[in-house]
Amino acid sequence: MTIEEVQNEIIEEFAMFEDWEERYQYMIDLGKDLPLIEEKYKTDDNIIKGCQSKVWVHANMQDDKINFTADSDAIITKGIIAILIRAFSNQHPKDILEANTDFIDKIGLKEHLSPTRANGLVSMIKQLKLYAIAYQTQLN
Amino acid sequence: MLDVQKIRKDFPILNRTVNGKPLIYFDNAATSQTPQQVIDVIVDYYSNYNANIHRGVHSLSQEATDAYEQARIKIQKHFNAKHSYEIIYTAGTTHSINLVANGFSSLLKKGDEIIVSALEHHSNIVPWQMLCERTGATLRVIPMNENGELILSDYDALLNEHTKLVFVNHISNALGTINPIESIIEKAHAVGAAVLVDGAQSCPHLKPDVQALDVDFYVCSAHKICGPTGVGMLYGKEEWLIKLPPYQGGGEMIAEVSFAKTTYAGLPHKFEAGTPNICGGIAFGAALDYMNGIGFENIAAYENELLAYGTEQLQKIEGLKIYGTAKEKTSVISFNVGTIHPYDIGTILDKMGIAVRTGHHCAQPIMDFYKIPGTIRASFMFYNTKEEIDAFIVALKKAIMMLS
């Protein structure tokens, strides 16, 4: 699936929920299924700055596609990063770089998009894209 | 007694909803809300007599100057300072602390010692670290115990003839501990050290008497006392304010200027360079009027009730741990529930219209002491109610259920 297709799939899933409680509950559940980062990568270097909770992200490339793993000490943050990783994992670096992130707004998590929010969603997106830039450079 | 329903009508913001739910504002230790009486003063200033002060000969300037200086006298009376010129207007607590720390740069030398407490806000740690770097003085720390109280016997041991300054907050922002500043001041004076007390958290809850305390410097912000942001005060004993050099150069703070030499203005203008926050200063005075109208004894009695009730209700929740259990504390409750991250709880509470603080509260050394990433902090003011605490407990239980 393309990034856009995955994003549409996520939007459809969230559209089933009627209120914030169900949405958050689902996000928390997604967090529990997050592809976890290996312990050896949970270093201070891999912590994303700008989050009130700790978020670690690692990326590797296989067959020209990037796979992300992550973890956080806060469960809602884990849910947010799980949604992002689902959209961006197993994708070509170029596609990740070009992808937009409007779907976050469409699934009712707009409040997390503000750059001043302590959860650092914006920093997370930036970090995923930085990995994509790094791997794209390797491919060129 | 305090009529909380009548008081709540003074605060327009308490009528709003957040995420579709009535706002429950429990982040008062970060900033307090503003009553209509203070909002009216701000509107009146900009509607009727906005002008630059002290320099103009025209009527508006005169009116603004009078109001600004009358507010200074209100602040003087409130804190029982000996002279109105011992009250310096600043941009707030942090600015006040930096003003003093900067002034002491020229008074300290290598080998001198300054003491801070383990309970400090970053704004009362970093300026002193910078001061130590500039002067070669050494920073010493009064440790705290598990309850969040300062260990005074260790303080005694830190004091000696090299101690030049002691800095301590009156009330801890992260834990709510009320520190025994009377005894801290007395002991510091016995070795000839000056004392600065950070009153950012105490001024909303009690009325300090700077002469009775015999404190050398006392600082606070208006926005924690129902006033606007961006204005605060530094009280300094006259003898100290004379000793400290000016902090910033500019207009207002000078007596005469030539390119050969400038002579500085007297107190308080020596420390008030540039056009100040005129409206803020006037509104600061109005906020003190408002608080005094309710009465600090009434405020303290009511807030103690809220604290006792909130503590009792929270303690019933399984796995909940309160940080800061000092015998003397104010209406701040810092806590965690099991291993749930404070950020998660704060986020869910916000969805239910409840504003609390989560994180390290700019007091990382305290969090390190307890070995936790942060806490959830609920802080109450006199306009909060037991019904709000009940709603908060229900919401908290729901958050715990969702997050467990």
Image (spheres, grey):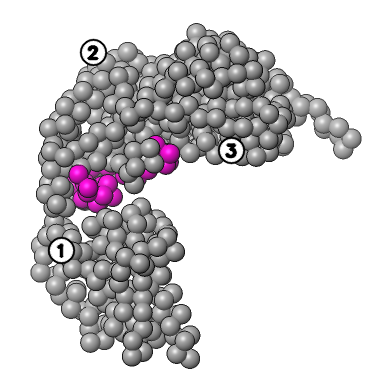
Tell me the residue that label 3 is attached to.
B129
Nearer-the-camera pick, B305 or B18:
B305
Residue A19 percent location from the top left of the image = 12, 59
Q: Which chain carries label 1?
A: A
Residue A92 occupies which quadrant of the picture? bottom left
In the rendered structure, the residue with mark 2 lies on which chain? B
According to the picture, the residue beneath numbered tag 2 turns out to be B1
Residue B199, horizontal then vertical, whole percent: 46, 25
Closest to the observer: B110 or B345?
Answer: B110
Q: Which of marks 3 and 2 is nearer the N terminus?
A: 2
For the residue labelled by badge 2, is the local secondary structure a helix, a strand or a loop? loop
Q: Are dots 3 and 2 in contact, CB under 8 Å?
A: no
Q: Which residue type does callout 3 highlight?
A: Gln
Quick one: label 2, few (<14), some, or many (20+) residues within 10 Å? few
- Mark 3 secondary-structure assignment: helix
Residue B322 counted in the magenta span: no
From what the image shows, is residue B191 above or below residue B221?
Answer: above
Residue drawn where x is 31% and y is 84% of the image: A91
Cβ atoms at labels 1 and 3 below 8 Å apart: no
Measure the alpha-carbon separation of dots 3 and 2. 44 Å
Gap between marks 2 and 1 measured at Cα: 49 Å
Vertical comparison of A54 with A98: above or below: above
Mark yes or no: residue B404 visible: yes
Task: Please check the rendered image and state whether residue B346 is part of the magenta-colored stretch, yes or no.
Answer: yes
Q: Which of B280 and A14 is in front in this view?
A: A14
Q: Dot 1 corresponds to which residue?
A: A29
Specify whether disc 1 shares its chain with disc 3.
Answer: no
Image point (30%, 72%), residue name: A69
Is the residue at mark 3 from the same chain as the one at mark 2? yes
Q: Which of marks 2 and 1 is in front?
A: 1
Q: In this view, does A47 lie to the left or right of B331?
A: right
Q: What stretch is highlighted in magenta?
A: B338-366
